[in-house]
Image (spheres, rainbow, N blue to C red):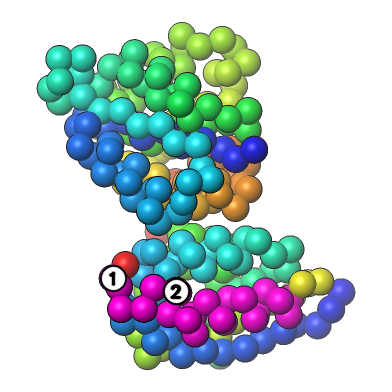
Amino acid sequence: MSATVQDSVVITHDVGLHARPSVKLTKLAKGFAAAVEIAIAAEGPWIDAKSIVKVMAMKARQGATLHVRAMGADAQAAVEAVAGLVRRDFDEAGHGP
Amino acid sequence: MTVGIVIVSHSPDVARGAADMVRQMVGDEVPLGFCGGNPDGGLGTSVEKILAAIDQAWSEDGVAILVDLGGAETNSEMAIEMLPDERQAKIVICNAPVVEGAVMAATEASGGGSLADVKRTAEELSAQ
């Protein structure tokens, strides 16, 4: 098994991790074999990024730092993809949830 | 294959609106059927329309039905009972709010979740 890959990214999307961004993040995470987890504090709690219910329940807001970590063969790609999506404002800058 | 989602509401507008949310938030890869209203065009549900919606959303991996109130559930149960046994075994009714449940269930389905995963995800919402 490969080591844990971790990154953090500030949520700049104007409404934060709300409904539509949550769906996008979850769908993206599900595309990887690695276990992908996110947290709004470096010390956790870490939640399963592949669980839409848990991701949406985080209610991570604009300005919050989202920590992303992954464990598994494609962990590096998973973390890059998830952090990249957040950096790109979920590909829908300026639009509501 | 991807698990299909069926939305059954008393209101055709609610059913269509919930289906729009699934399409726009999750995408087109999830087989989707929806129905609302009685055959006269009023509020209600009909077994016939539910059967058509199940057909529309049919997937060999199964179909998860989201319902709103009372008759939507009992008519869905009646519709399922009218289907052949092999289909009945692949259909579940989720105990979840219709709009939110449909989006959650479709998200899980789009990621390749099994019928049990889809049902659990929709129902997990109410347990939060």
Q: Residue under circle 2?
A: A91
Query: In the drawing, does residue A38 fall left or right of residue B11?
Result: right
Tag 1: amino acid: Gly
Query: Does the stretch in magenta take in A81?
Result: yes
Residue at 15%, 15% (x, y): give it: B40
Residue at 52%, 31% (x, y): give it: B63
Q: Is residue B22 above or below residue A41?
A: above
Mark 1 and mark 2 on one chain = yes
Query: Does the stretch in magenta take in B69?
Result: no
Q: Position of residue B25 (x, y in %)?
A: 40, 56
**Can residue A79 be seen here?**
yes
Tag 2: amino acid: Asp
Q: Nearer the viewer, residue B98 or B3?
A: B3
Residue at 64%, 81% (x, y): give it: A80
Q: Position of residue A79 (x, y in %)?
A: 65, 79
Query: In the drawing, does residue A67 fall left or right of residue B15?
Result: right
Q: Chain of mark 1?
A: A
Q: Position of residue B68 (x, y in %)?
A: 28, 35
Magenta stretch: give its range: A75-96
Q: Quadrant of the C terminus of chain B?
A: bottom left
Mark 2, secondary structure of its residue: helix
Q: Nearer the viewer, residue B104 or A39?
A: B104
Q: Residue under circle 1?
A: A96
